[in-house]
């Protein structure tokens, strides 16, 4: 009897009933996500008294300095707000007697040291930075933090090495030649990446190759994290994941997992083919999301995962050191 009644119900009503059924689960699970993010992230917590959260603020600021120092045309006096904020956080960190052997803390000091040397070499006055840095660090020199010089030959020689060596020589590169990147070469990189695992092999990822310079500029005006180097990009790749392939509240974050895994495969594939690339995050408001969709013409069903800029390698260039934590600091055996 129940089945006969259901057959008489119009499709639109069935869809509405199905939505109502899932609505409670959708709201409660997204509320759970939101609650955990607000409580356990650095949004409302006192960052000054929590070592992990203070470390996160330090990393974020010193990486701004590293990036600026790696740019092809580094502007004197760059990152004024970031360097002052970084010094503030370093002073608080030291005052609280947190672990000064921490790699992030030492990388930050190394970055400030290189920042000072860069401006000293170019005879640009940054007296406040020097004074405050000297009060924090009076004698130590650190090899971590800042930038390092690389060559095209070094990258290419290691892009065909064993995987351990291969992966160690993949860097986020922000300086490219003006040589055009052939679409066929990008297609090959994407094809290599199609072996990336996906939930139930649904293969939801899409790659939008943006070659129109005006479109790239418009996209970059929304994604502001490319300042100082975005203009060097020859091509822009936008990674998306199609929501229409997912079902149920339990898969609410799966598109980002599948998309993120594919993006890493693609970065390795670009590296393997001798191209330089840099990831641009897409952590933006819904208004910016809608704006980018309209400009590029992204389908409504697709989640935007991230962007990747691509170009050909110069013979010599700088990259941020971007120090990595010790492996024992990220492993838990239970």
Image (cartoon, rainbow, N blue to C red):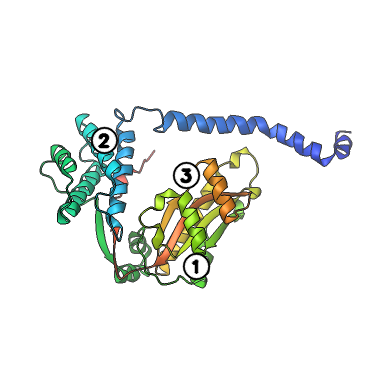
Residue 283 - label: 3
Does residue 286 appear in the picture of this structure?
yes
Marks 1 and 2 close (CB-CB < 8 Å): no
Left or right placement of residue 34 versus residue 13 in this view: left
**Residue at position x 80%, y 39% from top?**
12
Nearer-N-terminus badge (3/2): 2
Task: Please say whether residue 326 is visible from this viewpoint.
Answer: no
Does 92 sit above or below residue 81? above
Residue underneath mark 1: 186
Label 1, label 3: how many angstroms apart (C-alpha)?
Answer: 25 Å
Residue 301 is left or right of residue 178, and the answer is: right
Separation of marks 3 and 2 at Cα, in angstroms? 23 Å
* Residue located 55% across and 48% down the image: 291
* Residue contact at pointers 3 and 2, CB within 8 angstroms: no
Q: Is residue 198 left or right of residue 318?
A: right
Q: Nearer the viewer, residue 178 or 169?
A: 178
Tell me where residue 235 appears, x and y as whole percent: 47, 64
User: Percent position (x, y) of residue 264?
Assistant: 45, 56
Q: Nearer the viewer, residue 311 or 84?
A: 84
Alpha carbon distance from label 1 to label 2:
41 Å
The image shows residue 189, relative to residue 284, as above or below, that is below
Residue at 43% across / 52% down in the picture?
Answer: 280
Residue assigned mark 2:
89
The image shows residue 295 at horizontal and vertical percentages of 56, 54
State the image quarter where residue 80 is shown.
top left
Q: Nearer the viewer, mark 1 or mark 3?
A: 3
- Tag count: 3
């Amino acid at each position: 009897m129940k089945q006969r009644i259901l057959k008489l119900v119009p499709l639109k009503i069935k869809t509405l009933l199905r939505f109502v059924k899932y609505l409670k689960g959708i709201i409660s699970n997204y509320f759970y996500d939101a609650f955990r993010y607000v409580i356990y992230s650095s949004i409302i917590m006192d960052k000054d008294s929590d070592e992990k959260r203070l470390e996160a603020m330090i990393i974020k600021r010193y990486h701004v300095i590293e990036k600026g120092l790696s740019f092809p045309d580094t502007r004197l006096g760059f990152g004024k707000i970031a360097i002052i904020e970084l010094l503030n956080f370093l002073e608080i960190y030291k005052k609280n007697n947190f672990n000064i052997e921490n790699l992030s803390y030492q990388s930050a000091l190394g970055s400030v040291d290189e920042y000072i040397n860069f401006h000293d070499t170019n005879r640009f006055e940054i007296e406040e930075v020097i004074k405050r840095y000297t009060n924090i660090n009076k004698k130590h020199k650190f090899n971590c933090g800042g930038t390092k010089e690389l060559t095209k030959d070094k990258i290419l020689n290691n892009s065909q090495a064993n995987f351990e060596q291969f992966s160690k020589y993949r860097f986020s590169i922000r300086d490219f030649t003006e040589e055009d990147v052939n679409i066929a070469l990008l297609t090959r990189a994407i094809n290599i990446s199609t072996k990336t695992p996906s939930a139930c092999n649904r293969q939801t990822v899409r790659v939008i190759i943006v070659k129109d310079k005006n479109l790239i500029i418009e996209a970059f005006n929304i994604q502001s994290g490319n300042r100082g180097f975005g203009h060097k990009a020859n091509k822009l790749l936008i990674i998306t994941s199609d929501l229409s392939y997912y079902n149920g509240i339990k898969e609410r974050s799966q598109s980002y997992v599948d998309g993120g895994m594919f993006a890493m495969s693609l970065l390795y594939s670009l590296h393997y083919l001798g191209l330089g690339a840099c990831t641009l995050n897409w952590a933006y408001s819904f208004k910016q999301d809608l704006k980018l969709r309209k400009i590029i013409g992204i389908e409504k069903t697709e989640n935007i995962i991230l962007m990747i800029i691509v170009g050909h390698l110069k013979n010599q260039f700088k990259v941020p050191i971007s120090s990595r934590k010790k492996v024992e600091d990220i492993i838990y055996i239970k």
